[in-house]
Image: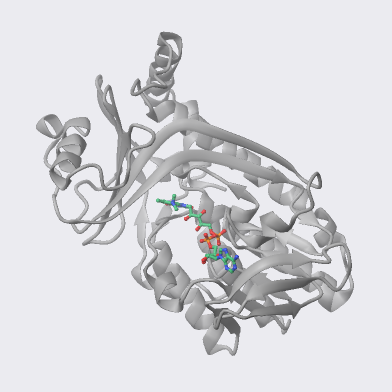
Amino acid sequence: MVVLGAGPAGLVLGNLLQDAGIDCVVLERAERTHLRTRARAGFLAAHTVHVLERHGLAEGLRRHGQAHSTCEFRTEDGRFRLDYSGLGRGERHTVYPQQLLVTDLLTRFLDKGGRIEFGTEATAVVDLDTDRPSVTVREADGRPGRRRARYVAGCDGRHGAARRSLPPGSVRRYDCAHGVTWLGLLAEAPPSLDAVGYAVHERGFAGHMARTSEITRYYVQCEPGTPAGAWSEERIWDELELRMGVTKYGPLHRGPVVQRTVVDLESDVLEPLRHGSLFLAGDAAALISPSAAKGANLAVLEAELLARALIDDLRHGDAEGLDAYSARCLTHIWRAQEFSHWMIGLLHGPSGADRPSPFHEALRQSRLASLRTSRSRQDWFAEHYVGV
Ligand code: RFL
């Protein structure tokens, strides 16, 4: 078995296959140190935590993760809070930075004798339609190479080799550019509120999400095409403070901005997620905008489904799970996409060239108002916000 990519999807899959005694190698383009410091997600759904616990992969997050269950919306009409542990299914998030999760998964995999080839870039998956597919690679020393396997798992993200190797016309790609751009920031500053903060302001969206007691993630909506370094730190903090209404609701802890990423909100889904001997999981299967924090959670869910199906096939000769893999994942993916899309509509006021029409703006305000006042709406929100 060859797994492409050592992100959450590839590493959960690798650990589960290895625990079942299935020989697998993970090919990873980046170096190990890069993976341990690549900050991205932080909010893990209850289901994700259950999966990790079920397979003995949750030690770090149990020790260092923080339970989290409140979000606060700030609008021109005031603010309101939802404690979602008392709504919907009563579930919470666990806040645990993705780079720590990846580090835990890597360490466990390697400690148990797993093989990861760092600095090895998959260039193509070939012979997908046979039961001896292979992966062509650029080895760490730059020379070309090849790995053969019974199956290949494409967990190498949106721009990876797995997607590129799908024969033209063999999959359908649904995609959507939402016309919204965020500047994603990591600040060396403690969180400023005990909730996820979503500010909907006439100058655009601003978001606050705890990561650790010393690090906070912020998002600030900017014009599409804005380079990551375009705003000074002072401008970033001034905009965040203005949009988050600090004069009414209290100050933000300022600190050095240690990472900036431009995030164009985009989504796509490939269908089906299998082509012959190649299976897609995580961002390689579907890209989801970070508006509802679903990407890493879907990656873990799909990795577990794929691992089970591969084990059934390779250990017991039962191919039913592999045949059903794509359809099973797509049900979850589309539900997450639908919620994520709803969140984008909820959070983005008028700004920039893609200013919504007055009709859409009024719809957005009505959507916020029903979330503020309707218990059944809040239950629906909670179930989808924490769930995958
Ligand atoms: P990853 O994590 O991108 O890992 C793919 C790995 O494949 C490697 N790779 C290759 N290796 C070999 N050969 C090639 N040709 C290769 N091409 C790529 C890469 O180096 C990498 O190591 O994909 P995976 O495993 O599918 O996991 C997906 C998640 O990383 C992603 O969905 C989340 O980070 C999305 N996301 C969030 N998700 C959440 O569930 N909760 C959050 O709070 C959350 N916040 C975020 C996010 C994504 C963000 N960015 C990247 C826009 C916040 C941000 C800013």
Q: Relative to the observer, which residue lies in front, 143 or 334?
A: 143
Image location (x, y in percent) of residue 184: 33, 47
Q: Residue at x 58, y 53 (%)?
A: 158
Q: Position of residue 31 (x, y in %)?
A: 46, 76
Residue at the location (38% across, 33% down)? 224
Image spot of residue 41 (x, y percent)? 42, 56
Residue 277, can we see it? yes
Using the rendered view, name the quadrant where residue 71 is placed. Answer: top left
Q: Is residue 262 above or below residue 41?
A: above
Which scheme is used to colour this image of the protein? Answer: one colour
Q: Position of residue 340 (x, y in %)?
A: 51, 37
Number of disc labels:
0
At 55% across and 81% down in the image, what residue appears? Answer: 140
Q: Height in image: 318 above or below 298?
A: below
Q: Quadrant of residue 336?
A: top right
- Report the residue that reaches farthest toward the top: 359
Q: Pick whichever, 130 or 141, lies toward us.
A: 141
Quarter of the figure that contains the N terminus: bottom right
Residue that appears at 40% across and 12% down: 362
Residue 308 visible in the shown view: no
